[in-house]
Image: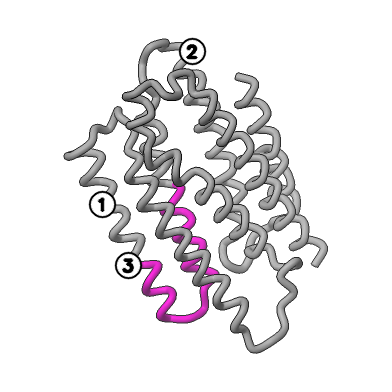
Amino acid sequence: MLSIIIGSIPLLVALFVSAIYYKRPEPGRLWLFTWFLLFTFLVQTGSYLYCVVRPGHSNHFIFNSYTIVMFIFYAYIYYEVLTRPLFKKLVACGSLFFFVFCFYHIIFINHFFKYSPISYDVGGFLVLCYCFLYMTELLRADEFINFFKTPMFWISTGIMISIGGNFLYISFFNYILDNKMDSQGHIYNLISTVLSIIEYSLFAIGFYVKKNG
């Protein structure tokens, strides 16, 4: 419970900052982050309450659904902010592949009520590629760009740290559970909490510099 509260504080701060500083219309659909962060908070709260109300029942189906929504959302954001047609096509193709792969794996191979770490790994890898495409555009831009006053620079950095940090643990998630290596989830909670603090703090900085850029 404590880790959830601590991890939710930077999320709520980022949500608060985005709600204040982002107004429609915003370039790149960045104003959608306000609703996405709210959705993320509701998912985290709902998954915890589900375990409280139904102890002993898995809440993995909630995170399977959230994984799909999260990575499709990130793909949409990068499709909007990227300017090169080739990069946009790569994001579109990657998103289609991810959606079809997740649907097939979760429904037919894994199980909707059992967490699908490979779906997270595939989605995370694709989003990391989108982040690198965006960073490539920044580095190769003809005009001077102050990265520290560019919202998507901070957001992309937060995404890369979060996904990269979770990647190894999520990759061996089922193995860890099956062998009771982290039966109480303390290691995962610690990793997730630290990464959440870093990720959402960088999100909040990105929203703030947009207002004050």
Identify which residue is drawn at 75% across, 67% down.
Answer: 149
Q: Do the residues labelled 1 and 2 touch (CB within 8 Å)?
A: no
Find residue 167 and report its horizontal and vertical position in percent: 45, 46
**Of residues 182 and 55, the one drawn nearer to the viewer in this rendering:** 182
Q: Local crowd at mark 3 within 10 Å, few (<14), some, or many (≥20)?
A: few
Amino acid beneath label 2: Val
Identify which residue is drawn at 65% across, 21% down.
Answer: 2
User: Magenta span has 84?
Assistant: yes
Identify which residue is drawn at 40% across, 59% down.
Answer: 126
- The mark that comes first in sequence, 1 or 2, is 2
Mark number displayed over residue 101:
1
| Furthest residue in direction right, as rendered | 212
Tag 2 residue: 52
The image quadrant where one finds the N terminus is top right
Question: In this rendering, is residue 158 above or below 45?
Answer: below
Find residue 162 and report its horizontal and vertical position in percent: 56, 48
Find residue 153 and report its horizontal and vertical position in percent: 65, 64
Amino acid beneath label 3: Cys
Gap between marks 1 and 2 measured at Cα: 32 Å
Question: In this rendering, is residue 144 above or below 160?
Answer: below
Q: Is mark 3 on a helix, strand or loop?
A: helix
Relative to 147, 170 lies left or right = left
Gap between marks 3 and 2 measured at Cα: 40 Å
Relative to 60, 167 lies left or right = right
The image quadrant where one finds the C terminus is bottom right
Chain part drawn in magenta: 70-92
**Magenta span: chief secondary structure:** helix
Question: In this rendering, is residue 119 above or below 76?
Answer: above
Mark number displayed over residue 10:
none
